[in-house]
């Protein structure tokens, strides 16, 4: 989150616009919320000007792996050759400077996926849904998103899972504060009727999971945050750059407001 604020600190620092200034309700996703909280100008570039962040090898490989896992589970899972067939089929060619670079990253992705079927064989949970869309109203707005996977554990508890393909592994304390997981827990219940007991970040490349209990006491604050961000976006005439985020921003080479250095 921008400046590593807690949700409450962010809400306090970003008061609601006056009621008369608020536009109609909007449909909002976690990615839009993330972009606005990181840098309002980034939100404008991506969602108003429809500029796409340039794909790089890391982001492109992430898309390929997500697609492969989705196709694999939709087809009922199976063994490694089947997963690797889906990987080849779903491979995204964009984002690589040379054919050699693309081949190197393709091999890297294969090594990541080679771990996956063995981990899955140990799984005792039943997969209830993959790439499941949700949509629920938060007046006057609508929150929407897609959950990578919803499992039912052997004890019947519901687990909401988000795949991560990077290696920056969040510990339990960070995962408990993770806004995306919190929103997905809310979406699973409000829209899909799954009351999640557990929220999981599944680091596919590391073969590791960080799982935290779904904490209903966060939900009021998360809902307040969603509405606040949507209110601010819907009533904004100008989106201000937040240059503290530039070093980590995919647009820093192309953005007129990017901080130098
Ligand atoms: S480069 Fe900086 S100012 Fe421009 S969109 Fe990214 S974070 Fe915002």
Image (spheres, rainbow, N blue to C red):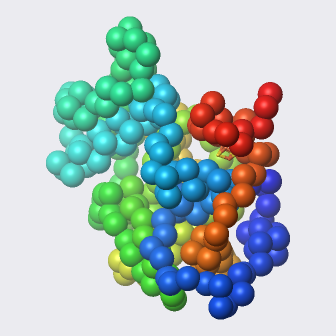
Q: Compared to 101, does 260 lie above or below?
A: below
Ligand 1 shown in quarter: top right
Residue 192 percent coordinates (x, y): 35, 77
Looking at the figure, which quarter contains the N terminus?
bottom right
In this rendering, position of residue 175 left or right of residue 68: right
Looking at the figure, which quarter contains the C terminus?
top right
Measuring 37% from the left and 42% from the top, which residue is drawn there? Answer: 66
Q: Compared to 59, does 109 lie above or below?
A: above
Residue 105 percent coordinates (x, y): 42, 19
Measuring 50% from the left and 84% from the top, which residue is drawn there? Answer: 24
Residue 111 percent coordinates (x, y): 40, 22
Which of the 4 image quarters holds residue 95? top left
Residues 156 and 34: in front is 34
Q: Is residue 214 visible?
A: no
Residue 217 percent coordinates (x, y): 67, 81
Q: Is residue 44 visible?
A: yes
Measuring 45% from the left and 84% from the top, which residue is drawn there? Answer: 137
Measuring 79% from the left and 61% from the top, which residue is drawn there? Answer: 5
Residues 190 and 14: in front is 14
Total marks shown come to: 0
Residue closest to the far bottom = 20
Which of the 4 image quarters holds residue 11? bottom right
Residue closest to the far top = 100
């Amino acid at each position: 989150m921008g400046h590593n604020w807690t949700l409450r600190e962010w809400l306090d620092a970003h008061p609601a616009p006056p009621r008369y200034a608020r536009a109609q309700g909007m449909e909002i996703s976690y990615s839009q919320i993330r972009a606005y909280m990181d840098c309002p100008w980034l939100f404008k570039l991506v969602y108003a000007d429809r500029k796409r962040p340039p794909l790089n090898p890391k982001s492109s490989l992430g898309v390929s792996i997500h697609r492969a896992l989705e196709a694999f589970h939709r087809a009922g899972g199976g063994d490694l050759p089947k997963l690797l067939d889906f990987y080849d089929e779903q491979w995204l060619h964009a984002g690589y400077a040379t054919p050699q670079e693309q081949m190197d990253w393709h091999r890297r992705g294969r090594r990541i996926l080679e771990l996956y079927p063995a981990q899955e064989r140990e799984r005792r949970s039943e997969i209830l849904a993959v790439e499941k869309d949700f949509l629920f109203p938060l007046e006057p707005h609508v929150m929407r998103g897609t959950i990578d996977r919803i499992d039912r554990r052997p004890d019947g508890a519901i687990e909401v899972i988000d795949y991560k393909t990077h290696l920056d592994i969040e510990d339990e304390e960070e995962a408990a504060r993770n806004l995306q997981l919190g929103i997905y827990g809310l979406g699973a219940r409000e829209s899909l009727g799954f009351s999640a007991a557990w929220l999981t970040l599944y680091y596919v490349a590391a073969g590791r999971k960080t799982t935290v209990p779904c904490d209903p006491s966060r939900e009021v604050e998360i809902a307040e945050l969603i509405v606040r961000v949507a209110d601010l976006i819907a009533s904004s005439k100008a989106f201000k750059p937040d240059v503290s985020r530039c070093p980590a921003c995919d647009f820093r080479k192309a953005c007129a407001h990017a901080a130098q250095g």
